[in-house]
Amino acid sequence: MSKHIVIDPITRIEGHLRIEVIIDDNNTIVDAYSSSTMFRGIERILQGRDPRDCGLLAMRVCGVCTGTHYLRSIETVENAFNINIPKNARLVRNLIQGALTVHDHPVHFYNLAGLDWVDVISALKGDPKKAAQEANKWAEVAGTGTWNTGELVYKKLQERLTKFAKQGRLGILANGYWGNKHYKLTPEQNLIAVSHYFDVLDLQRDAAKMMAIFGGKNPHPQSIIVGGVSCVQDIENPARIALFKSLLRNVRKFIRNAYLPDIYMAGTMYADEGLDGTGAGLKNYMVYGSFRLDDTGFYHSKLLFPSGVVLNGDLTKAYDLDHKKIIEDVTHSWYKGDKRLHPFEGVTIPDYTGLEKKSDGVAYLKTKGKYSWIKSPIYGDDRVEVGPLARLVVGYAKKDKRIVKYVNNFLKRSGLPAKVLFSSLGRTAARAIETEIVADVMVEWSDQLAANAASGDLRTWSEFDFDSASKNAVGYGLEEAPRGALGHWVKIKNGKVENYQMVVPTTWNAAPRDYKGRKGAYEASLIGIKVADPNQPLEILRTIHSFDPCLACAVHLIDTNGKELGNYKVNTACTV
């Protein structure tokens, strides 16, 4: 008899997400539904505002990717006003966005998604000496050094964790599915990964400081303005750039000596899931493109991550992106309207229809009707996935030399074929590969900024006539946030915002079905996954977390008759 599993809310993400799946008698997922249970309506707040202020408000849509939304909003208005920013402003923006990327991806793997791959309690059984040897082994595979220098680090951490475990004080690491048979790392490997979990808690401060050096503060930077940036003194002061580079060196060391070796380790131990395509989903990928490498103008610059579309996992062909093909459908979303609209014409009118209550009192999504606060974006006539994996797939298919080099290096060192990319494992590995690329290029950008300032070029802003430009204008900002393709669209009339729409990465990935009944990326990725224990839906979390949802603390599981199978609460008070 099939079972109906509800996980609400999904934890270790930003925001509120509900997942419902149907599993058959073999515990294999045969249907899945993704629902955002949170409505915010930022677009409506922006209506009637001065477009130059939109960035400061738009960044409040998220507490994680604040700088990304800030940048997209500013660039959207610049596109509307036909403004091309100076070189210094481009480099500073790249460095702020790059700092966010090298902050976001390690935090995602270790502190959010990593606990789906790493068994914390198993680490208590690991031999510290063997763990040090194991760490050296994977550092050699990655072609790097090791982050932790010896067994003493692992021994001290293990003693600390054992003490807390005996006292029942694991805090945020408590109530995991420790011991689940779908964990595959050895005790020593788990010990290595857990040690890096705690290292990242410290390391992320350095990445945050990097964002603050040019952004003014973090989160919610304030130095990006329509026409350029305002951090003139930070650009002309060599000590500020030197401090940025010093922090970057430490972050790069962790990426190369800990993050990448751990991904090689996990990739080898979970290779079967990559090879059989567990969590692959749509296998359609879309990228807006990211990080401008020259100053030839808006949407004419060469990009570090090129824009494009790849369909059906075909790495031999990539299509050019046409933003006019983007539409949003609300057939299964809690909004009014029956037309599929381009974001320029988009409307955001709430129409909440509630949940379906069964006779047993349990509420389920009304999956035949509206069941999510997320709209369903469509590119052309295809549902697509966005994110780090999409960026690497499109760059690889477009034969971008830098991306091909880094991806091939990873595949060669791991001994795995390219098809492992199309999986939850591949999605997780893609973040690490991308982090390495961005961290390396940031060295070049910081050197370019220093050289440009030393040459006497301190221009940070392009002048424009606001009164003339804002009479009647439309603009869009398409770029890549760490989680994927992020688009902002604006209509400006008589100096005020007439309409504003955003389509964020999680809108693409976590969307419900569309007007044709086609699944969104989350939903499609869950089909066919076998759950070892319905009371411990580890496999569901592993795949959903691989997307890094940005959408809060109990998990409920129920069967198709509404009977509660389990109730798992996460204690958010950290005592470790």
Image (tube, rainbow, N blue to C red):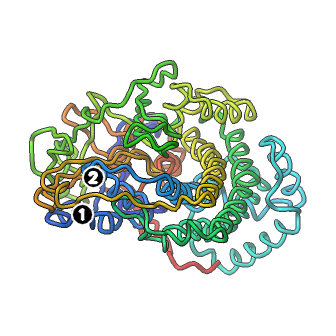
- What's the residue type where badge 2 is placed? Met
Q: Where is residue 237 drawn, in percent x and y?
A: 61, 70
Report the front residue among 456 and 285: 456
- Residue 179 occupies which quadrant of the picture? bottom right
- Residue 207 occupies which quadrant of the picture? bottom right
**Image quadrant for the C terminus?**
bottom right
Q: Where is residue 328 drawn, in percent x and y?
A: 22, 41
Counting residues from the N terminus, which is met first, the one under dot 2 or under dot 1? 1
Q: Is residue 294 above or below residue 157?
A: above
At mark 2, the secondary structure is strand
Please name the residue shown 62% across and 52% down the image. 448
Reading the image, the residue beneath label 2 is 502
Q: Where is residue 18 drawn, in percent x and y?
A: 34, 56
**Image quadrant for the N terminus?**
top left
* Category of crowding for the residue at label 1, using alpha-carbon neighbours closer than 10 angstroms: few (below 14), some (14–19), many (at least 20): some
Q: Is residue 176 visible?
A: yes
Q: Is residue 157 left or right of residue 410?
A: right
